[in-house]
Amino acid sequence: MIFGVDYYPEHWDSSEWAAQEKLMRKGNFNAVRIAEFSWKKLEPEENTFDFSWLDKIIDVLAAEGIGVILGTPTAAPPKWLADKYDVYMRDKYGRPRGFGSRRECCSNNPYYTERSEIIVEKLAERYGKNPNIIAWQIDNEFGCHSSTRCYCDHCKKKFANWLRDKYGNIDKLNSLYGTVFWSQQYDSFDDVILPAYTSCEADYGDRRAHNPSLEMDFYRFSSDSWIEYEQLQADIIRRYSDKPITHNFMGHFSDIDYYKLAAPLDVVAWDNYVDNQWNNPAYENTSMAHELMRGAKHKNFWVMEEQAGPCGWDMFGGTPRPGQLRLWTYQAIAHGCDGMVYFRFRSAPFGMEQYWLGLVDHDGVPRRRFFEVQKTGAEIKKLSDMFVGAESPTDVLIVKSYEAVWSHKIKRHMSSFDYRELLYRYYKANNDLGTNPDCGSVNMIDKKYKVVYMPAYIIVTDEEKAILEEYVNGGGTLVLTHLSGIKDENNNIVTETLPGKLRGLTGITVEEFDSSPVDTQLSDGFGKACGWRDIIKTDGDVKVRYTSEYYSGSPAVTVNKFGEGSVWYVACELSDAALFKLVKMISDEAGAEYIPHPEGTEIIKRRSCDGREYYMLMNFTAEQKNMDMTGTSLINGSMFDGKIEPYGVEIINRKEQ
């Protein structure tokens, strides 16, 4: 298993390299990622290249038995390039994203892509057959700093061609966009605007003020642009190297379609920061992010940047408590991580991330965090064959659609609605129950899943409808909610009776809806509905009804038999307690397996490549927990009595009670 650190040898005098690499070896590391921000050092002047320092550091690392994940440096272009070619992205006000940070360049700028091709080819040509290179990372975090969409002239021209390829003639675009509204018809594809700043935004702040079909296509185009840029680099590398190619994704980030971004890669990696300057999300949020990354290619993933200390840019984030770095590492492994790389090895005393601490502090002295990870590495080395390629069997799937993210973002329905938060709430309810759900695309739907959740799946294509009907007809249980099936592929409201293409599956008709800021009481101990409430009629069974407001007595949760399976429709947003109750009810009726566990813990059943089953038990709280499970520890061979220490981890062959 890859067990490594992110390393920046260019930040240190070369006289320190050998000692740093020896310390890495003592830490049980077998890999480093390097060079992803070193374009200027590799190409100090245009077409003048210097790889001598990189040659040397690769040799020094090899002498310690440490392999290299080599990053292409295109996320941080040198100033000579930016000044000469004006490769800066433009924001919606037309302002350049100037030099001084990173990710300021436009993937559709031909000068940027040309210089990117040159530096990537030079690297691939030089190191493609180097035995010490174990993998490649393309660029770094596409889309970070909210820089996915660009409004420059290059993007406008390329967007026109993208639309021309998609629609063929401008009359078709005008018809599908409904540009007759507000007299917005276009005379040619070159005439189509980018959805930048408008007069309406001056009155209404940061609310969307463009044609929603135009906005939707611009999201698609912008996502496709970065996927094309990634593909460009992958194609170059593969001409010279057969080593795995990855890119470091960002968990819940959704401005790029990660299913499509994953396609050109051999393995998905992602950057996991659990507690930083900006947020400290619940552990279930991190678990879901791991599952989303596993779902991007429907295979195990790597973590390319794992938090190793307090982190922030202008303020420090929280300091990991004793045991948490080890815990977070095993959390990743339990959810499908085959390679763990910590950010970073030694903390930088300068630059933007001098408050983003690594395993070793600024003075280079290893302390508690280093030794905790050193211990973790020794454990992982022993158990590596149990982890790499292992599965976490589950019969529950939660479907995420990036197009749904964009559609819900363009038209939010109501101020309190957040599609990604709704997905998370369904994930958390399943996590609390213990189903350990997969997360992925509609194309992952398979008969092995007894329950598939698709909350607020707003756009349904004919192909997706066929997938859902086949799944349910074959005996599956599908869970749909309010705001499902209400838009067409052009992000317009469907003219069919709602829920549109899903009416036959759900057996319901949406008569009207209520988004007023009131709580509505529910029957059968389900408490109250908050947020959106569909008012529906059904041909199926009613599980829960509204008991207040003018729609008192009408269905709130229904079940419709379809073929051999069933479709649940949840017409409203539920409280956390009510949602947990519903998820348990659905799991029990569908026969989905789950492992009960104490609050603040996870128990993940795993199966190694050779079929051995084991359980990973994790305590995310500062209190001892009784897991009500015993067995033989795979970590130290002792008998595990069920008690797990604060921030503790245990891996066991379970003893049946």
Image (tube, rainbow, N blue to C red):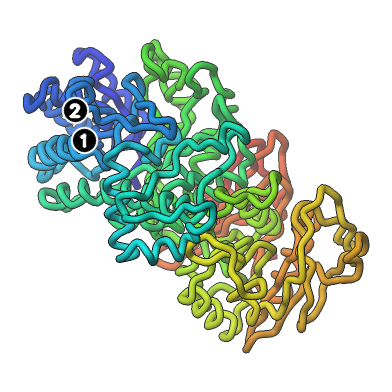
Q: Report x, y in % for residue 506.
A: 67, 77
Q: Report x, y in % for residue 36.
A: 27, 32
Q: Nearer the viewer, residue 126 or 119?
A: 119
Q: Nearer the viewer, residue 422 or 8?
A: 422
Disc 1 target residue:
112
Classify the position of the C terminus by image quarter.
bottom right
Q: Report x, y in % for residue 108.
A: 26, 42
For badge 1, the amino acid type reads Tyr
Is residue 291 visible in the rendered image? The answer is no
Number of numbered callouts drawn: 2
Q: Report x, y in % for residue 484.
A: 63, 65
Could you give the CA–CA distance between mark 2 and mark 1, rounded to whole angstroms?
Answer: 8 Å
Residue at (73, 50) in percent of width and height: 598
Disc 2 target residue:
85
Q: Residues within 10 Å of mark 1 (few under 14, many from 20)?
A: many
Is 56 on the left or on the right of 408, as rendered? left
Residue at (52, 49) in percent of width and height: 637
Query: Which structural element holds mark 2?
Result: helix
Q: Nearer the viewer, residue 520 or 304?
A: 520
Is residue 183 visible in the rendered image? The answer is yes
Q: Are marks 2 and 1 in contact (CB under 8 Å)?
A: yes
Residue at (48, 36) in percent of width and height: 197
For badge 2, the amino acid type reads Tyr
Q: Nearer the viewer, residue 465 or 353?
A: 465
Residue furthest to the bottom: 563
Is 151 on the left or on the right of 400, as rendered? left
Is 316 on the left or on the right of 259, as rendered? right
Query: Which structural element holds mark 1?
Result: helix
Q: Residues within 10 Å of mark 2 (few under 14, many from 20)?
A: some
Mark nearest the camera among 2 and 1 is: 2
